[in-house]
Amino acid sequence: QVQLVESGGGLVQAGGSLRLSCAASGSIFNIYTMGWYRQGPGKQRELVAGITRDGSTNYADSVKGRFSISIDNSKNTVYLQMNSLKPEDTAVYYCNIKCGPWLSSSRDYWGQGTQVTVSS
């Protein structure tokens, strides 16, 4: 099993910043991707940002230029630096990891979610 522990959510005013962290532990073997998803009120869960072990990244158009994802392979930890936050960024943010002994048998694991609330 793989455990994900998230931290860093909270309440911030529009224009402010927050940094989310997600540490993975357990039977990880190899990490293929880590990422952050979010689910706002009444909305479907959506990808915010993803990163591969070699550092390749992708972002949702709505956060490009404001959010930055990074990974510390030595700590199996992924970070999401969120700047210039907007009220529409308000959501529960979930950490995701795709890992396993081989890519063909890799699995997705999810964190418990951390609330980010941006006030106007």
Image: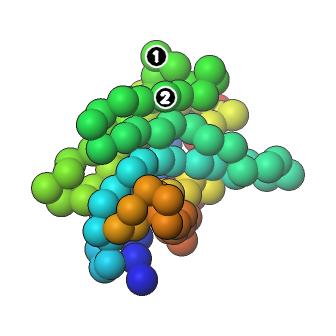
The residue singled out by tag 2 in the image is 58
Please tell me which residue is depicted at 33% across the width and 50% down the height of the picture.
78
Crowd tier of the residue under label 1, counting other residues whose Cα lies within 10 Å: few below 14, some 14–19, many 20 or above = few
Q: Type of residue at label 1?
A: Gly
Please tell me which residue is depicted at 44% across the width and 56% down the height of the picture.
103
Compared to residue 51, the image places residue 112 above or below, namely below
Of residue 68 and residue 115, the one placed in the foreground of this image is 68
Compared to residue 10, the image places residue 57 above or below, namely above
Q: Mark on residue 43? A: none
Compared to residue 17, the image places residue 109 above or below, namely below
Q: Is residue 20 visible?
A: no
Residue closest to the far bottom: 1
Q: Position of residue 71 (x, y in %)?
A: 27, 44
Picture mark count: 2
The residue singled out by tag 1 in the image is 65
Frontmost of labels 1 and 2 is 2
Q: Is residue 49 visible?
A: yes
